[in-house]
Image: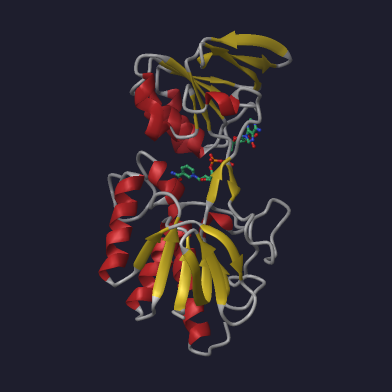
Amino acid sequence: MKIYDSIIIGGGPAGLCAGLYLSRGGYDALLLESGFIGGQASLTSNIENYPGFENGISGIDLAMKMEEQAKRFGLNILYNEVKNINLSGDIKTLLTADGELHAKTVIIACGASPRKLGLPNEENLTGSGVSYCATCDGAFFKGMDVAIIGGGNTAAEDALFLSKIVNKVYIIHRRDNLRAEQSYKNKISETANIEVVYNSKIKQIVEKDGAVNGIEIDKNGESAALFVRGVFVAIGTEPRSGLFKEIKKDENGYIITDENMKTSLPGVYAAGDIRKKSLRQVVTAVADGAVAANSAALFLSGGIV
Ligand code: NAP
């Protein structure tokens, strides 16, 4: 039976960085990714606050560079989904579609996925006007009016990205102030075709012929209709932590770690957006990945972590 030193679950910045550190350190590490390399970061059009790229870099370019760097040191990457997992005991077992995998340590870096609005038409219209990724789907709305729901950095970044493609962008935000960083707010106020609609909640996505044909919003208790063909949902994320039943999490499902990325189970570490933390950005994800890899390496060599 093949036993890896470490299996990393998730190929976003946290997982890729953990993989880089472990493989560079001579450990036999395998990274499992169920979708695309780069995680949520790869959906970002331009990352301006990751040091070393003075003009910013697209999320996908950054992810590809991280992947190449980790592979150069021998990281194995397998595109497969973990279906079940047993993290107790000295040897951890992960069940994938192609069978069982075994490792002495596991680094959980599955990140988070976009939160849904929970509106009746939302699921039906996903891919037909409703989107969770402006950089992936923005081009379908060239010259049209679109709405972004949310008020954080993602909503702001999506609005700025879409403003260059579409006719008009409405940002529908439930409060009277965007949560997004000031630099984004400044750019938004300087962009003529972005309108922020404050104190407003989306009530309904109107459907016609299987596509989005406007939205109904509640603004300060009054209903209003907006004719938009696209609805970009940017209301935050939820951790992909459902599989890890044995591990201690907070009330929102984020995995609780100590400063060494150690979880409640020996030999199991968590890194990146799936972890309970205050700042979820690429720079903090890679830092988590490095720390988790170092802790796993210490554990493997009989250290105390
Ligand atoms: P976020 O910061 O959690 O913001 C979510 C936004 O959606 C908030 O404005 C929130 O409103 C609103 N919201 C939440 N639930 C809602 C609901 N049910 N209906 C309507 N509105 C709702 O999420 P995010 O913008 O996706 O960002 C996630 C993380 O990634 C953050 O840590 C962010 O800083 C980071 N990020 C960083 C960058 C960057 O630095 N370049 C870019 C993108 C994302 P309230 O404000 O009222 O809570």
Q: Is residue 11 visible?
A: yes
Q: Measured along the vertical axis of the image, is residue 33 above or below residue 227?
A: below
Nearer to the camera, 192 or 86: 86
Q: Position of residue 121 (x, y in %)?
A: 61, 22
Q: Residue furthest bottom?
A: 302
Q: Measured along the vertical axis of the image, is residue 44 above or below residue 128?
A: below
Identify the coloring: secondary structure
Q: Is residue 108 visible?
A: no
Nearer to the camera, 83 or 290: 83
In the rendered structure, the answer to whether residue 246 lies left or right of residue 142 reads: right
Q: Position of residue 218 (x, y in %)?
A: 68, 16
Number of disc labels: 0
Q: Please state, as top left, top right, bottom left or bottom right, where the C terminus lies in the image.
A: bottom right
Dividing the picture into quadrants, the one containing residue 74 is: bottom left
Q: Position of residue 192 (x, y in %)?
A: 40, 17
Task: Name the residue rendered at 59%, 66% in the picture.
Answer: 85
In the rendered structure, the answer to whether residue 10 lies left or right of residue 84 reads: left
Q: Measured along the vertical axis of the image, is residue 284 above or below residue 268?
A: above
Q: Position of residue 200 (x, y in %)?
A: 65, 21
In the rendered structure, the answer to whether residue 232 lies left or right of residue 48 reads: right
Q: Measured along the vertical axis of the image, is residue 46 above or below residue 258?
A: above
Task: Name the residue rendered at 54%, 45% in the picture.
Answer: 113
Task: Name the residue rendered at 65%, 75% in the picture.
Answer: 88
Q: Quadrant of ligand 1?
A: top right
Task: Name the residue rendered at 53%, 90% in the picture.
Answer: 302
Nearer to the camera, 35 or 37: 35
